[in-house]
Image (cartoon, rainbow, N blue to C red):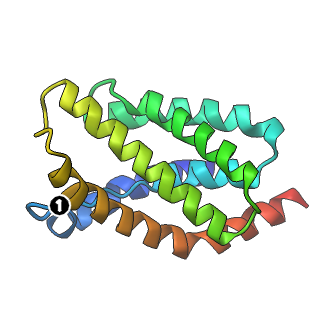
Amino acid sequence: MIGLVLMFYLDGSISQVFSSWLYATPNSMVPYLTLMWLSMTAFFTSSLRSTHVILWAAVIGFVFDLYYTGLLGVYVFVFPLVVYIGQSIYELLPPNFFSGFLVFFIDITLAISLNFLANIFVGQVDPSATIFLVNALAPTLALNLFFFAICYFPIESLYAEHRR
């Protein structure tokens, strides 16, 4: 819970402090540290606790929407869905860094794509797939996979120590 709240505020803090670099036209790199924490929690906890992770994903998605966008949006649905799909895929793979990296790649791709589709639906973005892939998805993936590579082993050891 503490890690989730910390990552929630780090999302906004990193976005604010590095906004001129992260959101330089035409590219945008959106940090998804909250989703990273949720995904890693789903990776490192037992399947009995997965329903709790999905519930927390819905709660933090609700708060994420209200706090960062100002209205109830897609993250209340996207976070739990992505966590559930990510955990389902991760259970089929051997539990290691590369499996987690692949699953988190899928999680981020799914989250940003669903957000993009919702924004197309309400008319907030240009529905060009090429612009989305080059200017939004690729930079966001690069940023978040970098964060994942840095945070994977410390978070894994935190959960391993907590299980003892």
Above or below, comparing residue 11 to residue 118 in the picture: below
Q: x, y percentage for residue 8?
A: 45, 49
Task: Name the element at disc 1.
Answer: loop
Above or below, comparing residue 82 to residue 10 in the picture: above
Q: 75 and 11: which one is in front?
A: 75
Residue found at x 66% / y 70%: 97
Q: Name the amino acid type tagged 1.
A: Tyr
Q: Where on the picture, by quarter, is residue 49? A: top right
Above or below, comparing residue 162 to residue 148 in the picture: above
Residue found at x 33% / y 24%: 72
The answer to whether one can see residue 91 in this image is yes
Q: Count numbered badges in the picture.
A: 1
Q: The C terminus appears in which quarter of the rendering?
A: bottom right
Seen in the image, is 67 located left or right of residue 154? left
Residue at label 1?
23
Q: Residues within 10 Å of mark 1 (few under 14, many from 20)?
A: some
Q: 68 and 43: which one is in front?
A: 43
Q: 75 and 108: which one is in front?
A: 108
Q: x, y percentage for residue 66?
A: 34, 30
Which residue sits furthest right? 164
Seen in the image, is 147 located left or right of residue 51? left
Q: x, y percentage for residue 115?
A: 32, 38
The answer to whether one can see residue 7 in this image is no
Residue found at x 49% / y 37%: 79
Residue found at x 68% / y 52%: 90
Seen in the image, is 65 located left or right of residue 26? right
